[in-house]
Image (cartoon, grey):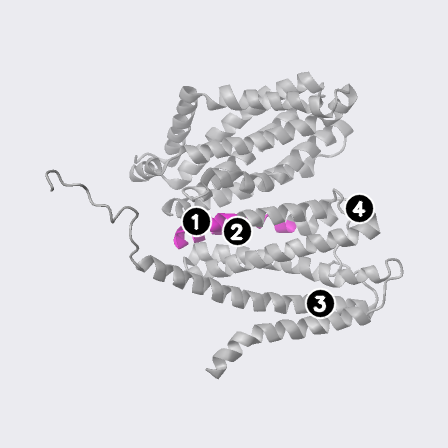
Amino acid sequence: MTTGFWHQVRAVIDRDLLRERRQGDMLWITIPFGAIALLLIPLAIGTDAVLLREIGPGMYWVIVMLFGVLVAVSRASRETLPQQDASALLGLDPAAGFVGRTASSAVFLLIFEVVVGVVAVGLYDISLIGIGWLVTTMLLVAIGLALLGTLTAAIVNSSTAGAALVPLLVAPLSVPLLLGATQTYDGLQGGYSILSWVLLMVAVVLVVSIIGVLTARPLQET
Amino acid sequence: MQSQVRIRRWPWVAIALSLAVAFTLSMISPADSVQGDLVRIMYVHVPAAWLAYTAFFVTFVGSVAYLVTKNLRWDRIAAASAEIGVYFTGLALSLGMIWAKPTWGVWWTWDARLTFTFIMFFVYLGYLALRRTTDDPIARASRSSVLGILGAIQIPLVHFSVLWWRTLHQPPSLIRPDGPAIQDSLMLAALIVGVLAFTIVYVALMVKRIELIHLEEKRLAVEQSIRRPVAGEAVTAPELGAS
């Protein structure tokens, strides 16, 4: 594999999407599980429509975060050492591998957010004021979670605890994204400025991107 | 031999002396006009929180230095500092909860400073867990260095959370643009001495922990060099036709 950086990124994305199309873990397991989780919450706390409308957006983002962790776990357990060695021998740039895996995870997470979001709007009667900013938030959260998931999957790679360690690492690190997403929604509903929250999410995405790209090679070498 | 004994003992002497001075000052400083003697928790709570930031910042520096130099000495520094940081974060959180009950009426409130500190605690618990699950020292150092850099994002979030959000927790006591919040000079002195004493404790613990990590690595190297019998080695395959 001696093609340029972006060609390599594209090849990794294509490989991951093809694998997902063949296995269908995301489509047939993760998305229905997320929808069920949204259905269970009213059964546990009560079915008061006003209360559900109030807590619905927060519940939606919590579920997105937790299932983002699930996507990262499946990614961590999917790539075996021989596969990684084969990629390295083929000359895959570790940074291109990181960007490609992140991009494919972000696509999965965005699909998850959209489908589960439709279910959340239906079940909780969530307001969609400021839809443009909501879409931007969904995009930033998907990219941020994908970055954190891909990076932590690379960190725990071949350690004895492996994928079991991923949730402990991703969940606390994704809190700024959860905070940014929920506060952006509240700001749009309340009519106050959301710029600082959007900037927080952008900052997380940028910082983790830089760390991920710069550390891709040392992580692969171990 | 004498100097070796002195080297081993000085951390404990430094810890005992500095804590004794800090304890004395915190006891002779006046009680607060509103909180009374409860304010004395501050002389341990604030230095513990300060030490948590310092320790995690050192972990960040050690992690960056390891990735740049590939020298395992930096990894030992990062690891030792993270362990001490987790301990002092736990101490700051516990003392904060003990302080919160009589002053705020609850053990825990969903305040930005408290919540972010708790999250930082879990991030570095994850760091320690990661180290325990990786046997190879080089792989362990590289992986935990990346996490040490990633986790450092939490430090400014915790420190500035009281300024960025309207919180129940008071703003920083010492490091503020308009000077320390404490007006009484004896209370301020007790707090500053407490911070210095805890910093000495940190340095002393770091020295001992790095020594210990170094010894652990030596022991592991010796253990790995010894050939151990393989399970089932004593079992020999049956030979056909043997009487």
| Observer-nearest of B127 and B71 | B127
Comes first in the chain, label 2 or label 4: 4
| Observer-nearest of B103 and A19 | B103
Rate crowding at label 1 as few (under 14), some (14 to 19) or many (20 or more) other CA atoms within 10 Å: many
Comes first in the chain, label 4 or label 3: 4
Q: The disc labelled 1 sits on which kind of residue?
A: Thr
Q: Would you say residue A44 sits in the magenta stretch?
A: no
Residue B35 appears left or right of A43: right
Residue B6 on image: x %, y %: 53, 79
Find numbered disc 1 in the image and state the secondary structure of the residue it sits on. loop
Name the residue at the right extreme. Answer: B33
| Observer-nearest of A112 and B243 | B243
Comes first in the chain, label 2 or label 1: 2
- Circle 1 residue: B134
Marks 3 and 1 sit apart, C-alpha to C-alpha, by: 37 Å
Q: The disc labelled 4 sits on which kind of residue?
A: Val
In this rendering, which labeled residue sits more in front, label 3 or label 1?
1
As displayed, is residue A111 above or below residue A76?
above
**Among the 4 quarters of the image, the one containing residue B238:** top left
- Circle 4 residue: B106
Q: Which residues are magenta?
A: B129-156
